[in-house]
C-alpha cells in the first residue's frame, strides 16, 4: 500500500550582499542550498526569487511578502539561506517573521546564525 504524503510548497529568496566580490557566486550557492533543503524535506519548490540589485531597497522581497501574506498565499514555506538575506536589523527580522506567521507561512532560515552576530551594534541599540 502506498503511503499518502502531504507536500508543502516552498518559495526561496536569495540576495547578494553589496560587498560580494563575485556577485553571482553567492546567489548560485544560496539557490543550491535552498533547492537541496526542499528536496531533502520533501517540499515542492515552486519559485526562487533572486534579488540581485545592489541598491538595498529589496523591492522583490517587499512584493514577495505582500503575495505571501495575501488571501491567495501561494506557498506554505518561505526559505532563506541566512537571516541576513532578509535584513540585518533584528526588529525588522522579527516583523517579517511575525507577518509570515500571521499568514500561516513558515519561515525557514537554513543558517541558524543569530542575526545579532552579523548586525552592526547601532542596529541592535535602536
Image (cartoon, rainbow, N blue to C red):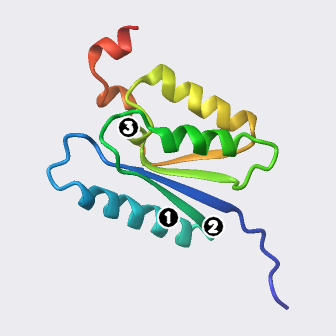
Disc 3 versus disc 2: distance between alpha carbons?
23 Å
Asked whether 26 or 7 is in front, the reply is 26
Q: Which residue is mark 2?
A: 43
Which residue lies at the image location 35% right of the left edge and 26% below the top edge? 116
Q: Position of residue 12 (x, y in %)?
A: 52, 56
Q: Mark 3 against mark 1, which lies toward the viewer?
A: 3
Q: Is residue 35 above or below residue 97?
A: below
- Does residue 95 sit above or below 45 in this rendering? above
Q: Quadrant of residue 83?
A: top left
User: In the rendered structure, which disc, 2 or 1, sits on the residue that comes first in sequence?
Assistant: 1
| Res. 114 image quadrant | top left
Q: Secondary structure at mark 1?
A: helix
Whether 114 is drawn above or below 92: the answer is below
Q: Secondary structure at mark 2?
A: loop
Instruction: Decide if residue 76 is on the left or right side of residue 63.
Output: right
* Numbered disc 3: secondary structure: helix
Q: Position of residue 50 (x, y in %)?
A: 43, 55
At 63% from the left and 67% from the top, the residue drawn is 43
- In this view, the residue in front, 77 or 3, is 77
Check if mark 3's residue and mark 2's residue have beta carbons within 8 Å: no
Residue under numbered circle 1 = 37
Residue carrying label 3: 84
Q: Earlier in the sequence, mark 3 or mark 1?
A: 1
The answer to whether marks 2 and 1 mark residues whose Cβ atoms lie closer than 8 Å is yes
- Relative to 79, 105 lies left or right: right
Residue 122 position, x and y percent, is 30, 12
Q: In the image shown, does 70 or 110 lie closer to the viewer?
A: 70
Q: Residue furthest top?
A: 126
- Residue 105, position in %: x, y? 69, 45
- Residue located farthest toward the right when viewing the structure as drawn: 1
Amino acid at each position: 500500500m502506498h503511503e499518502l504524503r502531504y507536500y508543502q510548497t516552498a518559495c526561496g529568496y536569495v540576495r547578494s550582499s553589496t560587498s560580494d566580490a563575485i556577485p553571482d557566486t553567492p546567489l548560485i550557492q544560496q539557490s543550491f542550498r535552498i533547492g537541496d533543503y526542499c528536496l531533502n524535506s520533501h517540499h515542492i519548490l515552486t519559485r526562487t526569487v533572486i534579488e540581485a540589485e545592489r541598491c538595498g531597497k529589496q523591492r522583490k522581497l517587499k512584493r514577495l511578502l505582500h503575495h505571501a501574506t495575501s488571501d491567495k498565499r501561494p506557498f506554505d514555506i518561505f526559505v532563506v539561506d541566512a537571516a541576513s538575506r532578509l535584513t540585518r536589523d533584528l526588529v525588522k527580522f522579527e516583523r517579517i517573521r511575525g507577518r509570515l506567521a500571521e499568514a500561516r507561512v513558515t519561515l525557514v532560515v537554513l543558517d541558524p546564525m543569530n542575526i545579532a552576530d552579523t548586525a552592526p551594534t547601532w542596529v541592535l541599540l535602536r
